[in-house]
Amino acid sequence: GTAFEDFSIVNCMLPTTYHPPLAGNVYERIAEGICRQLFPDAEMVKDYDQFLNKKPCKTDAVFAWHQDMAYWPPPRLTPDTRTVTFSLAIDRTTRQNGCLRYLPGSGKAKLLRKHKPLCGTRDNGHAVTAQVSDTDPIEFAEVPRGAITIHDEYVVHGSGGNDSNGERRTYVVAFRPKETVATERKLGFTHSHNDRVNWDTFEHIRGGAAPAEGAQEHRAPSGELKPLAEDSQWGEHIELAKANGVPLVVQFSASWCGPCQRIAPKFKALAKEYPHAIFVKVDVDDMPETAAEQEISAMPTFKVLKSGEVVGVMLGANEEKLAAFLRSSLA
């Protein structure tokens, strides 16, 4: 491993997890109060905290240009992306020691620029970088010790290396809507470097390469109901769910089945309630081999599969029973 003195950047995510007495400090309370003023209509809660330390004379202690949303689940999974990120300067920040730099106005459009992994793929390294042109205006947030800067989830920002003889330390705390944080946790996303997240489920990172023509794009359609059209898609979606470590929820139905059509809107709505699962709909007339393999004898039939194995089956078109079935099967 690397000796501590050889690190250029110390990036400690979730420090209050490791030192709980730090939680609820005066900085957090002030930040929470500011959030309430900025978004009085939302219940903003702390999403994560972070300590950063750029070691002295480490000119490679650089944070590449990025938008915070590039590191997080996309809007299709967390529609309310509102974020207030506070950065407390523990040391005075200057251009020399790598202060925050940003593109003014870059967050107004609420659009994510194209990003790519710095190390080729997310498996090789967590960091990403955004496309920034030579004509983009750059501002530097040089602030005194104890000052706080605030930015949102779409501002393009980064910071340079530390060419000074002193440390450049920052204490970050970020707030997001309560429902958004709850959805992140359901997805297994905590902002920890130890999160076991399959980044292929977050479609905004593609390494700059498009899929080959005709290639199957393995992306989990979380929060959406996807109709399947042919038997070959059954195996593909079982493997997709297994690869992403999420359940596969299936409705077996037919176009001529009245109860199937009546329960369909409820099943579609439930798909949005469980963004950590893949919801699909199988028409038994279009996919007879799959229907036979799954021994479908009545419709609608609902199944939940985990790791490719059936863990729950329900027959009928009772909305309350369906909701209860999914609550117990997806818990």
Image (cartoon, rainbow, N blue to C red):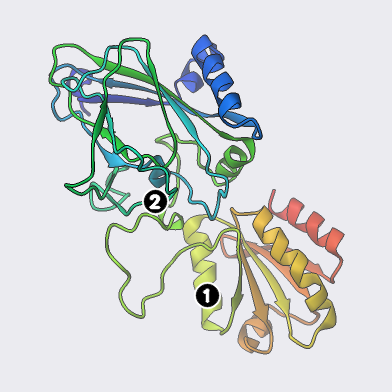
CA gap between label 1 and label 2 equals 33 Å
Residue at 59%, 78% in the rendered image: 228
Q: Give the mark, 1 or 2, whose residue is nearer the N terminus.
A: 2
Question: Which label number is shown at residue 179?
Answer: none
Please name which of the two marks, 1 or 2, marks the residue nearer to the observer: 2
- Tell me the residue that label 1 is attached to: 235
Specify whether 69 is left or right of 247: left
Q: Position of residue 233 (x, y in %)?
A: 53, 78
User: Which of these two is toward me, 16 or 70?
Assistant: 70
Residue 60 vertical placement versus 302 (above, below): above
Give the labeled residue for mark 2.
112
Q: Amino acid at mark 1?
A: Gly
Residue 45 location, quadrant: top right
Q: Position of residue 290 (x, y in %)?
A: 62, 82
In what element is the residue under mark 2?
loop
Decide if residue 23 is in sight here: no
Q: Is residue 115 above or below residue 27?
A: below
Mark 1 element type: helix
Quick one: 295 or 233, which is closer to the camera?
Answer: 233
Q: Position of residue 154 (x, y in %)?
A: 41, 42
Amino acid type, label 2: Leu
